[in-house]
Image (cartoon, rainbow, N blue to C red):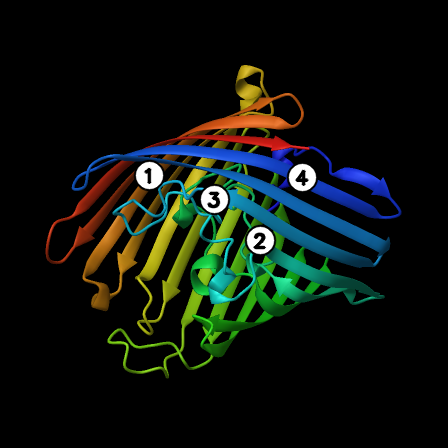
Amino acid sequence: MLLPAWFGVAQAWDLGHGLSVDLALRGIGQHGVFSGPASRAGGAALLDVAPRWEPTPDDVVFLWARFAAGNGLNAHTPTVLAPYGGDLGDDVRGIDGTDRSYLLEGWVQRRIPMKGLGVFRLTLGIVDVARFIDENDYANDQDGQFMNQALVNVAKSVLPNYEPAAVLQWDRGPWSLRAAGVLGSLDNSMHLDYGAGELVYTAQTPWGEGHTRVLGFLSGPGHPAPDGRMHDRRIAAVALNMDQALGDTLGVFFRGQVQAERGDGVYRSMLSGGAVWSGRAWGRPSDRVGIGYAMLEGMDHTGLRGTQLVEVYWRWRLGKAVDWSLDLQWMRDDYRHGSDVEAWIGGLRANVVF
């Protein structure tokens, strides 16, 4: 996902005639110390290529391909949550159980201004719905903000990613409404319809800009019950997502989510929040320091009572297009029966954006 303007990302290459390309080379390295299994280390290298063509002021054609080697610690950690919330080597091949690899998104968008009614945007194609729904200025991007899955996005834990979808967006003044329909699949064996909606209010306060988002998600029937014998369950969830700038140096965020006790999901509810400081306080305005906390309640069928997470990162900008971060995560999974799992994970992350 592209970083928000608050992070001051370098501009894409402008090739003329409305064509531009975002190129980013990324690397992560993580080392985990666990309460049960032996400690592990892992890394990944990523290349993002995202061409964008705007043939008219109202039309956009967008593609995003990610090439990845390695899986960091996602495949090795004994914790339920992934310490990196993005797509790694195994995720970009056979995407979501399909035969497609590397091409994560490919869509067209039409902007439709209507006098007196605001502006509508219609997006059709292979879409990451989380690009349009459940944004957050301070906790929405694992490549430049918090890395852990729980502090990145609610939509990614409910909706299928990179599937055929339609997204309709309406903007008028401080209000925005987004609605998405997704044709997903379960292991590429059966198709399910998913719907998502979000109402956004943007407030201009004496401290700065803030956003309040109310979200809802619903799937068609077909999800398996926990015993795997029924496929007539729906996935339903609601969420509240807020962020607020507090002057030029501090931003805070909050998310809350509740999911129905249906299907084979892991968590019933989640609360998360935190703060991000700008480096203006120490003379480096492009740097960021963030601290986040999440508390998640497990569903009954998992035997998982709940998970707690604390993450701290410090991000340095080195010139216009290079940044690197130190990251530290603590996670604890509490089980109703058996041993609990605790993990300390340190990480180093680097981005070169061309």
Viewport quadrant of the C terminus: top right
Q: Is mark 2 on a helix, strand or loop?
A: loop
Q: Are marks 3 and 2 in contact (CB under 8 Å)?
A: no
Instruction: Measure the alpha-carbon separation of dots 1 and 4.
Output: 31 Å
At horizontal 19% and vertical 45% (from top left) the residue drawn is 341
Q: Is tag 1's residue or tag 3's residue first in the polypeptide sequence?
A: 3
* Residue identifier under label 4: 23
Q: Which of marks 4 and 3 is in front?
A: 4
Residue 342 is left or right of residue 65, and the answer is left
Instruction: Measure the alpha-carbon separation of dots 1 and 3.
Output: 14 Å
At horizontal 74% and vertical 43% (from top left) the residue drawn is 21
Residue 131, position as x, y percentages in the image: 59, 55
Which sits in the foreground, 239 or 32? 32
* Residue identifier under label 2: 102
Q: Are marks 4 and 3 in contact (CB under 8 Å)?
A: no
* Residue identifier under label 3: 253
Residue 316, position as x, y percentages in the image: 53, 23
* Residue identifier under label 1: 310
Q: What residue type is labelled 1?
A: Val
Q: Which amino acid does label 2 sit on?
A: Tyr
Q: Is residue 122 above or below residue 148?
A: below
Residue 328, position as x, y percentages in the image: 36, 32
Instruction: Measure the alpha-carbon separation of dots 1 and 2.
Output: 31 Å
Q: Do the residues labelled 1 and 4 touch (CB within 8 Å)?
A: no
Q: Is mark 4 on a helix, strand or loop?
A: strand
Q: Is tag 1's residue or tag 2's residue first in the polypeptide sequence?
A: 2
Q: Are marks 4 and 2 in contact (CB under 8 Å)?
A: no
Most extreme residue toward the top is 283
